[in-house]
Image (spheres, grey):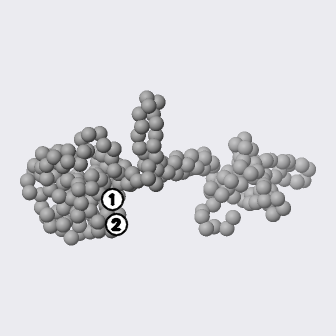
Amino acid sequence: MIDEQTAALFWSKIDRQEPDECWPWRGQTQGKGYGAFHHKGTLRRATHISLETDGRSRPTEAHFALHSCDNPPCVNPAHLWWGTQLENIQDALSKGRLNNREPTHCKNGHPFNEANTLRVVFPDGKRRQRCRACALESTRRARRKKKEAGIMGLSNPMRRMLIASCPDDATGEEGCGVELTTSQLYAAARALKRRGLGEVTGPGGSLPGMYWNNRDGLAKRLDLIPQGSPS
């Protein structure tokens, strides 16, 4: 039996939609996108837990949770029923799923409809469908990693200098100057210049050296400033 506390934790990991729609699992997954949930020290199929919280206990060890929607991440109990492996095969045959039919959803539960389906042609001439939503998320993750990698390589003095050289009011295309009054500031300024993020002048006479961001430096500065903070 599933106690109320476990049931509450389980349902918190589900993206509930309309009663007749798929409810994608947002927690840990196993092969082919099936949800997984830790229960009493055992990693179990999320579909099994869904049926049990719905008051339908597993009849025997030979029974498995089958989908009427054929969408592995779905845990909507209205789309699930207990069945044997033989019944699973018979269900697949009746739906044509054993005849190389293309899936209706991606592994993350997004539907392969007209708006969300990309058609990819491989060098061998074979065509595959690809999830547009997953492709966009993959691109976003790659951009975030690239952005984080660029910031991670900056020392704290370099970061402070990038932030201090705010956009110049006159042009807006380069940063205002930062006085280089210590050897540490000089080192940070030269390091930023080597990275192509700014320029260094001086010192000259009684005047200290100066550093200011170029366009690339101003762009990097925006990455360092938390969203919502004044620029």
Q: Residue at x 63, y 49 (%)?
A: 155
> In the rendered image, is residue 97 in sight?
yes
Residue 227 placement (x, y as % from top left): 60, 64
Q: As drawn, is 2 to the left or to the right of 99? A: left
Question: From the viewer's perspective, is residue 21 above or below residue 135?
Answer: below
Based on the displayed image, in which of its 4 quarters is residue 168 positioned?
A: bottom right
Question: Regarding mark 2 in the picture, which secondary structure is present there?
Answer: loop
Question: From the viewer's perspective, is residue 151 above or below residue 75?
Answer: above
Q: Quadrant of the C terminus?
A: bottom right
Residue 8 placement (x, y as % from top left): 26, 68
- Marks 1 and 2, Cα distance to the nearest angstrom? 8 Å
- On residue 17, the disc is 2
Residue type, numbered disc 1: Pro
Q: Quadrant of the N terminus?
A: bottom left
Residue 161 placement (x, y as % from top left): 71, 55
Question: Which circle's residue, 1 or 2, is located before the other in the chain?
Answer: 2
Q: As drawn, is 138 to the left or to the right of 215? A: left
6 and 31: which is toward the camera: 31
